[in-house]
Image (cartoon, rainbow, N blue to C red):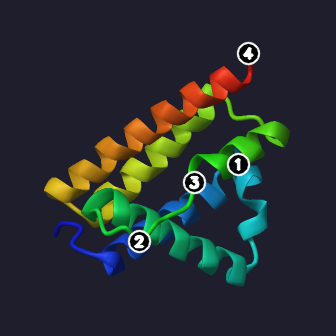
């Protein structure tokens, strides 16, 4: 079954964050989300983000890049982190969904990771 709405996106980001937070290379980026309340609030932000990315709902109005650039200042991202992030995202999509929107989510995640890497490399010059 394909991604059709917010409930599906919630399942996706929840599984994705479970993978990230269990990964020894990645979990240090997500320490602020070890508290269930903080994680749940963040998952809703992610649902809004992906709902907007996939379905153009306008549900996300923040600057998605800013928190990541702020994090970069004290927990630097390396190329490997983006590869692991993308691998976990794609695996999460593939475990839960199949179809055009699932493919679109993976394609957009690659674009997001690429743009973020470019912005971070520009910041480090």
Q: Which of marks 1 and 4 is in front?
A: 4
Q: Is mark 2 on a helix, strand or loop?
A: loop
Q: Which of marks 1 and 3 is nearer the N terminus?
A: 1
Picture coordinates of residue 124, whole percent (x, y): 74, 22
Q: Which residue appears at 38% of the width and 52% of the height?
A: 91
Q: Which residue is the site of mark 4? A: 125
Q: Which residue lies furthest to the bottom in this view?
A: 37
Q: Do the residues labelled 4 and 3 touch (CB within 8 Å)?
A: no
Q: Which residue appears at 40% of the width and 45% of the height?
A: 109
Q: Which residue appears at 49% of the width and 37% of the height?
A: 113
Picture coordinates of residue 51, whole percent (x, y): 35, 67
Q: Which of marks 1 and 3 is in front?
A: 3
Instruction: Give the Cα separation between the discs numbered 1 and 3.
Output: 28 Å
Instruction: Give the Cα separation between the discs numbered 2 and 3.
Output: 12 Å
Instruction: Give the Cα separation between the discs numbered 1 and 2.
Output: 32 Å
Q: Is mark 3 on a helix, strand or loop?
A: loop
Nearer to me, 79 or 122? 122
Query: Dot 3 surroundings within 10 Å: few (below 14), some, or many (20 or more)?
Result: few
Instruction: Give the Cα separation between the discs numbered 4 and 3.
Output: 22 Å
Residue 63 is marked as: 3
* Left or right of 60 on screen, residue 95: left
Q: Are marks 1 and 3 in contact (CB under 8 Å)?
A: no
Residue 24 is marked as: 1
Q: Is mark 1 on a helix, strand or loop?
A: loop
Instruction: Give the Cα separation between the discs numbered 1 and 4.
Output: 28 Å
Q: Which of marks 4 and 2 is nearer the N terminus?
A: 2
Q: Do the residues labelled 1 and 4 touch (CB within 8 Å)?
A: no
Q: Which residue is the site of mark 2? A: 59
Q: Which residue appears at 65% of the width and 21% of the height?
A: 122
């Amino acid at each position: 079954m394909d991604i059709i709405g917010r409930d599906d996106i919630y399942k996706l980001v929840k599984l994705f964050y479970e993978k990230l937070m269990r990964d020894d290379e990645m979990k240090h980026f997500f320490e602020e989300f070890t508290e269930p309340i903080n994680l749940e609030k963040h998952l809703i932000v992610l649902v809004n983000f992906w709902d907007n990315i996939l379905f153009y709902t306008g549900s996300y109005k923040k600057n998605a890049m800013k928190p990541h650039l702020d994090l970069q200042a004290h927990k630097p991202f390396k190329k490997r982190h983006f590869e692991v992030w993308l691998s976990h995202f794609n695996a999460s999509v593939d475990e839960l969904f199949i179809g055009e929107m699932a493919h679109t989510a993976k394609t957009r995640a690659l674009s997001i990771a690429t743009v973020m890497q470019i912005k971070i490399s520009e910041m480090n010059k």
